[in-house]
Image (cartoon, rainbow, N blue to C red):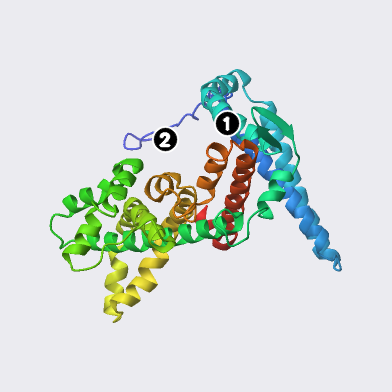
Amino acid sequence: VLTRDTAPAKVTAAPKKVEQPTPTPEPPRAISGLDLLDSAAAVARIEAQIDRDLQELAKRPRKKFIGARAQEYRFAQYVEDWRQKVERIGTLNYPEAARGLAWVSPAAIGIFVLIVIPFAWGISLAFFHHDAGEYSFVGLANFFDILTSKGYRVTEPLSFWFTLAVTIAWTFINVALHVSIGLALAILLKDPLLKLRGVYRVLLIVPWAVPNYITALMWKGMFHRQFGAINGLLSALGLEPVSWFTQFSTAFAANVITNTWLGFPFMMVVSLGALQSIPQDLYEAAEVDGASKWTQFRRITLPLLKPALLPSVILGCVWTFNMFNIIYLVSGGEPGGATDILVSEAYRWAFQRNEQYGFAAAYAVLIFFVLLGWTRLTRRLTGPEAA
């Protein structure tokens, strides 16, 4: 029974279902040519990993059934990843890939013309002998004569092995001086209490900014026996002037001094950039623990500098190994070709010793394999840190 004081119950209508519009699928993204190159590189890496896994599986004895099943399952995963990558390449937008390849084609053509063709020509020339404008095929005779030091003793300057020893000593001494001097100067320039740091940085980079052949000629003039500034300084100090290019030791030292002047700014810049990336909190914590400056340098600075210095050292070794300008312009190989390195020796065989282009090309090929072996050795010793 309803009275006036009783309100009727409110009837709530059921909410109507609103149909959501079906989302329109997004069109497939047009993959560029760079994605094509990246996918091809990824497939190549996967194939290489599969080959390595197969070789590893062949070496391991499969005594346990479970272990063999696990290895087979892992191999199946790699195969599936490889199949998916191949399917992805098949769905790429090839007009976009062609456009990307068109952008990189000028650089590829330049590399092919300036590097690949001369390299192939140099390798082929090493199997020929040049005489009075005519070439005759001699096979491996040039390499045999070089490696056996035909006509020269091993300890003579024109011997390949003597020149190789001089080149190795030249490279390691220079790189050691570059790294030590550059790192020491970088540590000094990092000091926040040092005034005029910007001025010092500019002045210390000048030797690196000046073209090396100009610097080489300047140092050659300073090493002059009669009018050189260095002998003038020695005379002012009451010392006897030195004939720098009449003995191997002094001529080699003159070359090293000149190249050290040219090379330390590069290592200084690399070291300074790496030092500024080291957190200052590490040094503060080390001081709280009572670590000395030498301990901080050995335990904090050097380990954190290693990833930046290792590639620079490898690059510096390659540069110094082929530093033709300093040898040719400062000492000129004196005395008697004793201070020549491999690259300057190859130049003399080509242009100063009866135009023996095949012999010089064989020298160049041997230089390439020496540097290739050195690079692979350093990568094996340093691991991924030098990559």
Mark 1 closeness class: few <14, some 14–19, many ≥20 residues within 10 Å: some
Q: Is residue 227 above or below residue 130?
A: below
Q: Residue at x 27, y 76 (%)?
A: 287
Identify the image quadrant of the N terminus: top left
Q: Disc number at residue 35?
A: 1
Q: Nearer the viewer, residue 255 or 104?
A: 255
Q: Label 2 is placed on what type of residue?
A: Ala
Q: Nearer the viewer, residue 181 or 301?
A: 181
Q: Kindly identify which residue carries mark 2.
A: 9
Q: Quadrant of residue 257?
A: bottom left
Q: Label 1 is placed on what type of residue?
A: Asp
* Residue 98 seen: yes
Dot 2 falls on a residue whose secondary structure is loop
* Distance (Cα) linking label 2 and label 1: 67 Å
Q: Residue at x 32, y 62 (%)?
A: 181
Q: Position of residue 36 (x, y in %)?
A: 61, 30
Residue at the farthest left position: 195
